[in-house]
Image (cartoon, coloured by chain):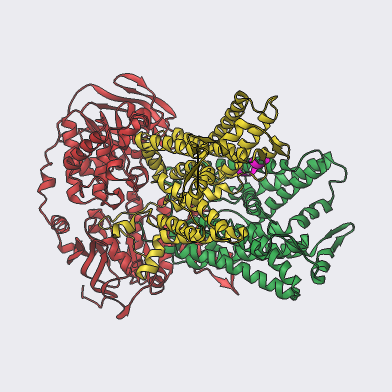
């Protein structure tokens, strides 16, 4: 029987790892370039600061990775983050216990995701539209709570926000980074070592096949949106620590940053291919761009967006190149065929 | 009656009518249209006038979506077009010189066309998934717009430019005339000429279209460029309306509203058959909703809540799965057509 | 062979779809340790019966008994748990996952909820080697050929402790060697007492492997027979419910003709797809391409039509050098190509019959010159009538048509262009016998009218019946070009394919 060897980009490296390695290389290159160009750049704390400033984005991007791997998309994450900061701030102002608030916010995020996932699956409406409605809903709820920024003065929160975890001489992180790291590790374990994780990949690879293989596609699809909702809520809590305020205009456009991080991390937006580690690198690259621009001083903030756009372009073209070379086998040419629901095409 | 019920624009139409009637309860003379100083006035006219930019963007979006694509970058293009036009006008010695204003507008529209074509090139030439290809310009475009305005809000004072968004012509608001014109041109190109068939064919099955001899690349680039142009016109209208350009906020989220308008209008996001009339209806629903919220005295902050509600309702009503489950109470949706026992070749 | 108790018994199965009764009181039974063929034209209800059995559809009437117990599967998963496994023609696996995962996903070996990758890999290697397949199980499934993927699917199906294995057209994409290997596996499974339900369009395969055959027609049961006791002609008669006169009318062999060359391919080739070949097609000539699947038949067609770029050689049309780099250029030269893959490369399912028929003509004219509505109606009506497309409503969506009628719509699309060369890639695959005969007759008529036809088919007798000349392919190479004279028979063709030269 015809056996085909796995095509590799470089000898010894499976092609599937190439996008992640490129991202890692880019991160290192940016870090080195920054170190050569700016005084006081090439320190470990710079990398840690990127984590500190982007812990919430990291957590949100982890949730987004689940959704995208399963072949979906979640536009609601930024709004859910904002809603979470808003609920947190207003309930704390009402004198609620900090831990009860956090728990409640996480549950709300999860339930929002669950609802969206259920609508997407049971009523077969495109994720793009459903999560768009979710985005409007969450933002709208923010404004019904209040249109102004609400400061957080709760002692638990302020203590948490101001504490630092020392890692060594002149190196420290915030507890938020620890939480982010735990989320990343748990998520990586789930994706690689549990049935849920593998079913996420299978669903993203071919939903119809996954159904016919008897996999719990419905549960999985709903689960990824629930996870994403939960991660967004957690990201919102971390943002509340970071900002010490709740505001309806927090995290505007964060869904774009999260999607960009996932794509730059080498995950295919079509689903089924990618690694969580890539997402971490994607967040780091985005954060490092901001750091470099702040070091540059003369560059205005909008260059960040332009750079991210350029990076997206480069990575998308790279993925495209890898993708086309893989499909050299004529009978397996990949086509954009919308996957119909089981039986719908008989 | 049942045929009417199953018409794909039935539910959007009912919702629009319902929204309009709701206004009548809260606002006297809601349906009154009068002529003051040779101009048409009235709530309905206002809805059309304020909705004009959204309708424009939605028309372009409809064609893009019909090809099986999507254009997330229209909001950025709106901002860029407005920013460039205002920048050029602000640099004029005489901001009221018609020639200078026209040149500025032409430049802005030209750039919009180029940006649209860039999207088209990425999609058709490089074969990148549309949602990703246009994400690039969506992210970078806001930066570009701010680059043009240097992060400032450019304010201008130009009477000729003001006409684009706020002027009147033949008693009608200029914006409505522009919309009618663009709509007529699109309808002519797609339905009188055969562009519509080719678009639907490319959206329905790209590879089959190529093998049928359709130059899909040309069609795609043209459609994306047209979408960019529509966004550019909308950008001019929006900036003209407020006589200023804000790179950060102009046209923010208009891509989402436009996509909604298209979906509400019954065009499937997976491409294929499209309905320009449905899209206009969809855009009007969104605009009416905004107006309604103001007129019935609900705090404007909650606009988004209502939008979420309407989107959900309309999409649910249009979802075959929802109708099956809720109205027929069948155990499983069976959409199998009769005799054809065909197999799908799932792409590998 | 004594009749043991059936492992599966379906009685009086009814299934109604909007507007059509897909199954009408069908009985079906499966014995353990038998290969049971399910036969019928397209539209007979084979797929529906399988989908009912595997829990994809629910039934409107009748009963299903498995192992003597009544069952009602709510989902494919429930059917699998009960021991009914299915392998579909299109290989329903996940191309992005590894081979090992595809075998085990949903049933992975776990310890405390943690997947044991190593155990999974080792077991996958072991299972595949039982099927005589030795591959890297950690590689993505998409990197392997369709035949390997099919075997992986079978390995998966068998691992689910299957009592009933359903193979739905598993052979349609396999070459002879691969079919042989599949049959060896099926025989082994049969010995283990597994009941196999086998669907195939190839009569030879049915006779080679099956013990018993059940024939369906128009959603109803025709009967159940011992395969060995049912002559082929009778089987076909039961499937189509009428005499074979339609097919036999074409039995006379076409005479070789010598007209001016229309297409001359010189050393045309494409790296990795087809080695450089010479091929001349004369006006009004039917050239058959014979060879196994994957031998380069489709690749020749795609090169001639400009669907793929040639890496070597040149092409002459009417004796003049022509560069056909795109289908558009080929269409301008009045070439036409009906792909074997109707659904992915032919039809636009969401458009109407009318739009699908005029599509190529409209594309050739460009979008600025629409075809006037009256002329559209005229063209569409003429071809709907001429090709007997049913239903004849031009505004019907083409997705609602049966396979044979969809094929005719595709043919009509090209015929209205009045092509000089019509390339037909497997035009009769997967369609019912009646439509098959109509399409074969059409080829003869076209050829008589001066249109050249390049005819690709897996069925050698069909190729022989229609072609003036047959080019034989093997391993992506044209090995021989034979005039269709008295000496050429399916046996000589088969021999040529097998040996690589005319003996």
Q: The yellow chain is which one?
A: B
Q: In this view, does C406 lie to the left or right of C363?
A: left
Give the chain coloured red: C
Which color is chain A depicted in?
green
Outermost right residue: A169
Q: Quadrant of residue C385?
A: top left
Residue C407 shows up from this direction:
yes
Q: Which residue lies furthest to the bottom in this view?
A: C69
The chief SS type of the magenta part is helix
Magenta highlight on residue B213: no
Q: How many marks?
A: 0
Asked whether residue A346 appears in the rendered view, the answer is no
For this view, does A344 lie left or right of residue B100? left
Bounds of the magenta span? B138-143
Tell me residue A122's x, y (percent). Answer: 45, 65
Q: Position of residue B180 (x, y in %)?
A: 45, 38
A165 vs B222: above or below: below
Residue A277 percent location from the top left of the image: 66, 56
Q: Which of A79 and C481 is in front in this view?
A: A79
Image quadrant in which the N terminus of chain C is located: bottom left
x, y (%) of residue B258?
Answer: 52, 48
> Quick one: A309 or A22, which is closer to the camera?
A309
- Left/right of residue C206 with respect to residue C329 in the rendered view: left
Query: The C terminus of chain C lies in which quarter of the figure?
Result: top left
**Which residue is at a point 57% across and 32% down the rendered structure image?**
B109
Q: Residue furthest front?
A: B37
Front in this rendered view, residue C49 or C140: C49
Give the vertical position of B72 relative to A73 (above or below).
above
């Amino acid at each position: 029987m015809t056996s085909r060897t796995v095509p590799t980009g470089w000898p010894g490296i499976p092609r599937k790892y190439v996008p992640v390695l490129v991202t890692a290389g880019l991160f290192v290159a940016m870090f080195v370039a920054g170190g050569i160009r700016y005084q006081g750049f090439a320190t470990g704390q710079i990398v840690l600061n990127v984590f500190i400033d982007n812990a919430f984005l990291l957590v949100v991007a982890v949730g987004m990775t689940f959704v995208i791997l399963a072949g979906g998309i979640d536009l609601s994450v930024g709004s859910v983050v904002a809603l979470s900061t808003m609920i947190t701030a207003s309930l704390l102002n009402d004198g609620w216990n900090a831990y009860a608030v956090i728990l409640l916010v996480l549950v709300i995020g999860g339930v929002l995701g669950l609802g969206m996932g259920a609508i997407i699956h049971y009523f077969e409406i495109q994720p793009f539209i459903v999560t768009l409605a979710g985005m409007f809903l969450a933002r709208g709820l923010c404004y019904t709570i209040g249109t102004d920024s609400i400061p957080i003065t709760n002692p638990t929160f302020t203590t948490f926000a101001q504490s630092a975890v020392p890692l060594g001489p002149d190196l420290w992180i915030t507890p938020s980074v620890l939480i982010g790291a735990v989320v990343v590790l748990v998520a990586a374990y789930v994706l690689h070592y549990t049935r849920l994780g593998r079913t996420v990949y299978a669903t993203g690879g071919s939903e119809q096949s996954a159904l016919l293989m008897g996999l719990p596609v419905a549960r999985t699809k709903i689960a990824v949106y629930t996870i994403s909702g939960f991660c967004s809520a957690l990201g919102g809590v971390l943002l509340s620590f970071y900002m010490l305020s709740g505001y309806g205009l927090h995290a505007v456009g964060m869904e774009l940053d999260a999607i960009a991080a996932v794509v730059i991390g080498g995950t295919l937006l079509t689903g089924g291919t990618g690694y969580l580690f890539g997402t971490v690198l994607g967040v780091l690259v985005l954060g490092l761009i901001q750091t470099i621009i702040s070091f540059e001083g003369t560059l205005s903030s909008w260059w960040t967006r332009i750079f991210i756009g350029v990076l997206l372009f480069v990575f998308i073209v790279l993925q495209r190149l890898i993708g086309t070379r893989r499909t050299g086998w004529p009978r397996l040419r990949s086509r954009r065929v919308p996957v119909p629901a089981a039986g719908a095409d008989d | 009656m049942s045929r009417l019920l199953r018409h794909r624009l039935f539910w959007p139409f009912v919702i629009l009518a319902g929204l309009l009637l709701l206004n009548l309860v809260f606002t006297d003379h809601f349906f009154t249209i009068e002529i003051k100083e040779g101009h048409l006035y009235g709530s309905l006219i206002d809805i059309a006038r304020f909705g004009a930019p959204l309708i424009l963007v939605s028309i372009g979006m409809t064609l893009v979506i019909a090809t099986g694509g999507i254009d997330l970058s229209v909001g950025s293009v709106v901002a860029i077009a407005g920013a460039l036009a205002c920048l050029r006008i602000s640099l004029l010695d005489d901001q009221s010189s018609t020639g200078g204003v026209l040149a500025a507008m032409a430049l802005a529209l030209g750039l919009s066309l180029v940006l649209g074509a860039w999207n088209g090139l990425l999609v058709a030439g490089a074969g990148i998934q549309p949602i990703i290809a246009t994400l690039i310009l969506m992210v970078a475009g806001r930066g570009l717009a701010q680059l043009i305005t240097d992060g400032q809000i450019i304010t201008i004072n130009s009477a000729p430019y003001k006409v684009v968004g706020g002027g009147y012509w033949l008693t009608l608001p200029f914006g409505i005339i522009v919309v009618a014109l663009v709509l007529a041109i699109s309808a002519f190109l797609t339905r009188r000429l055969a562009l519509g068939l080719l678009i639907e064919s490319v959206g329905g099955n790209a590879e089959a279209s190529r093998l049928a001899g359709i130059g899909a690349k040309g069609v795609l680039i043209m459609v994306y460029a047209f979408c960019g142009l529509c966004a550019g016109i909308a950008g001019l209208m929006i900036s003209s309306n407020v006589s200023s350009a804000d790179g950060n906020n102009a046209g923010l989220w208009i891509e989402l509203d436009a996509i909604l308008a298209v979906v509400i209008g019954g065009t499937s996001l997976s491409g294929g058959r499209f309905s320009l009339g449905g899209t206009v209806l969809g855009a009007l629903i969104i605009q009416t909703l905004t107006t309604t919220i103001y007129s019935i005295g609900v705090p404007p902050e909650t606009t988004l809540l209502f939008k979420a509600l309407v989107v959900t309702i309309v999409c649910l009503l249009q979802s075959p799965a929802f109708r099956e489950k809720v109205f027929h109470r069948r155990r499983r949706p069976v959409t199998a057509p009769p005799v054809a026992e065909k197999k799908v070749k799932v792409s590998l | 062979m004594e009749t043991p108790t059936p492992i599966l018994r379906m009685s009086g199965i009814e299934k109604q779809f909007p507007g059509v009764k897909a199954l009408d009181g069908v009985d079906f039974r499966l014995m353990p340790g038998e290969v049971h063929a399910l036969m019928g034209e397209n539209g007979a209800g084979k797929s529906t019966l399988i989908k009912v059995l595997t829990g994809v559809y629910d039934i409107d009437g009748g009963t299903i008994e498995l192992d003597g117990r009544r069952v009602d599967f709510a989902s494919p998963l429930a059917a699998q748990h009960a021991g009914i496994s299915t392998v579909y023609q299109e290989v329903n696996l996940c191309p992005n996952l590894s081979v090992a995962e595809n075998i085990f996903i949903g049933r992975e070996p776990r310890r405390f909820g943690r997947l044991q990758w190593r155990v999974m890999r080792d077991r996958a290697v072991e299972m595949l080697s039982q099927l005589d397949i030795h591959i890297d199980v950690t590689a993505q499934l998409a990197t392997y050929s369709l035949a390997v993927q099919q075997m992986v699917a079978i390995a998966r199906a068998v691992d689910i402790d299957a009592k009933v294995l359903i193979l739905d057209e598993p052979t349609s994409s396999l070459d002879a060697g691969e079919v042989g290997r599949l049959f060896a596996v099926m025989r082994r499974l049969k010995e283990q007492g597994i009941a196999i339900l086998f669907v195939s369009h190839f009569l030879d395969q049915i006779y080679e492997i099956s013990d018993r055959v059940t024939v369906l027609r128009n959603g109803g049961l025709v009967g159940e027979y011992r395969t060995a006791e049912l002559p082929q002609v009778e089987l076909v008669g039961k499937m189509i419910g009428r005499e074979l006169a339609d097919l036999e009318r074409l039995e006379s062999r076409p005479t070789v003709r010598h007209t001016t060359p229309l297409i001359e391919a010189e050393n045309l080739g494409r790296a990795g797809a087809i080695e450089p070949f010479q091929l001349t097609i004369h006006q009004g000539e039917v050239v058959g391409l014979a060879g196994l699947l994957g031998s380069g038949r489709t690749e020749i067609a795609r090169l001639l039509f400009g669907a793929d770029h040639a890496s070597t050689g040149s092409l002459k049309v009417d004796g003049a050098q022509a560069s056909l780099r795109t289908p558009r250029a080929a269409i301008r030269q009045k070439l036409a190509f009906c792909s074997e893959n109707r659904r992915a490369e032919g039809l636009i399912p969401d458009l109407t019959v009318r739009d699908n028929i005029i599509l190529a003509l409209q594309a050739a004219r460009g979008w600025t010159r629409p075809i006037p509505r009256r002329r559209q109606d005229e063209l569409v009506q003429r071809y709907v009538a001429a090709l007997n497309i049913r239903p004849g409503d031009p505004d019907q969506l083409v997705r609602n048509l049966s396979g044979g009628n969809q094929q005719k719509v595709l043919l009509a699309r090209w015929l209205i262009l009045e092509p000089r060369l019509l390339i037909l890639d497997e035009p009769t695959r997967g369609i019912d016998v009646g439509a098959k005969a109509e399409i074969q007759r059409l080829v003869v008529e076209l050829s008589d009218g001066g249109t050249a036809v390049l005819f690709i088919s897996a069925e050698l007798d069909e190729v022989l019946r229609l072609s003036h000349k047959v080019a034989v392919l093997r391993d992506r190479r044209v090995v021989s070009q034979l005039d269709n004279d008295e000496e050429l028979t399916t046996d000589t063709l088969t021999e040529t394919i097998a040996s690589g030269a005319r003996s």
